[in-house]
Amino acid sequence: MTAIPVAMRPRVSKQMILEVVDVRDLSPKVRSFSFASISGQQLPAFVPGSHIVVELGSKSNSYSLTGSGQYPDAYTISVALAPEGNGGSKAMHQLQVGDSIKVSYPRSAFAPVASARHHLFIAAGIGITPILSHARAAEELGRSSSLMYVFRPTSGVHLQECRSIYGTTLTEYTDRESFNSSLRSALLNQPIGTHLYVCGPAGFMSSVLRLAEEMGWPTERLHSEHFEADVQGPGKNFQVTLAQSGQTITVPGTKSLLEALEGIGISVPNMCRKGVCGECAVPVLKGRVEHRDLYLTDEEKALHETVMCCVSRAQEQELELDL
């Protein structure tokens, strides 16, 4: 898993207004958008695997950049339409060329390791988007890499770009069975010093990472990019003491800690509300956290010093927060 100290991780702080300069349908459900500077200036470079936060009305969502990050004239993302989502993808699919849009500066918790001897990329479905960024950068910088791409027949978005990078060495799978049958061999036959990067549905990533760990891959050579945490269900009631004001509130089992804080007028910076982005981190002064997020590392979670208040809760009856 990617491990970056909490204090060093980027936060959404600076934003810019860009113009939609290209909209393309990649499949019946996936649409590509490119944003460029209104003044024509070159955009800030970014490390492969970065994402931007797009603010559209009351919705804010993060999307992976598909470019290599080297001297970008535009930022390009691919957005899968999610009819059952929170409306963010529906709003995105309404964008047209010429529209203005507010986006964050690029940030990443899925950067490549420059010292890796080889980069093994594994992607499934829309998880190809950050992996494509890595693949393009590896090609431009002359880094050794290979790609295993799993997609449904007729819906392999960015497949042509992947083929242009890897040619006949690209391994394509249109069903999980064929991928699973070759994964073990692929994990066994990598050069020493290879780093693995995986992105796709949560269950897919978990199975890949679990097999790699079982086969002896060091965790520091395993990297993944999640879209959302799995556990979003209700929990038990618990009490929260806010140290700076002395106020105590009850968080009901049907609400998140973030919602409870917002309910009493306390604004906590947040973005994905899915336990992934790390934007809503709050310092914990007392108590143990029931971590439900995918942002903190296992080591960070064991310290119980930070809670991602959009999804995580208290293990016991009470938490004291530095708020």
Image (tube, rainbow, N blue to C red):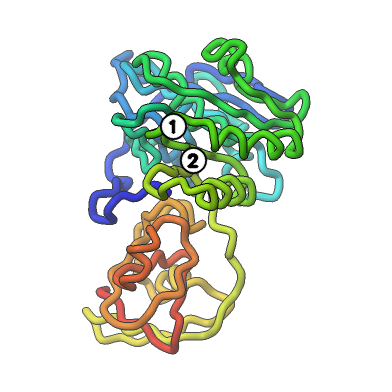
Q: Position of residue 46 (x, y in %)?
A: 32, 28
User: On the image, numbered disc 2 is attached to which residue?
Assistant: 56
Tell me what residue is drawn at x 70 percent, y 28 percent: 173
Element marked by disc 1 = strand
Q: Position of residue 227 (x, y in %)?
A: 53, 47
Q: Is residue 27 above or below residue 245?
A: above
* Label pair 1/2, CB-CB below 8 angstroms: yes
Looking at the image, tell me whether mark 1 or mark 2 is earlier in sequence order: 2
How packed is label 1: few (under 14 Cα within 10 Å), some, or many (20 or more)? Answer: some
- Classify the position of the C terminus by image quarter: bottom left
Q: Is residue 90 above or below residue 300?
A: above
| Residue closer to the observer: 115 or 65 | 115
Q: Is residue 183 above or below residue 163?
A: below
Q: Position of residue 158 (x, y in %)?
A: 60, 21
Circle number at residue 101 = 1
Classify residue 177 as left or right of residue 80.
right
Tell me what residue is drawn at x 45 percent, y 69 percent: 291
Please state which amino acid type lies under the numbered disc 1.
Ile
Q: Is residue 2 above or below residue 67?
A: below
Element marked by disc 2 = strand
| Residue closer to the observer: 203 or 89 | 203
Q: Is residue 132 visible?
A: yes
Q: How far, Cα to Cα, is label 1 from label 2?
A: 7 Å
How packed is label 2: few (under 14 Cα within 10 Å), some, or many (20 or more)? Answer: some
Query: Looking at the rendering, which quadrant does residue 140 occupy?
Result: top left
Please state which amino acid type lies under the numbered disc 2.
Leu
Q: Position of residue 20 (x, y in %)?
A: 48, 22
Tell me what residue is drawn at x 60 percent, y 40 percent: 89
Circle number at residue 234 = none
Query: Looking at the rendering, which quadrant does residue 31 occupy?
Result: top right
Query: Looking at the rendering, which quadrant does residue 315 occupy?
Result: bottom left
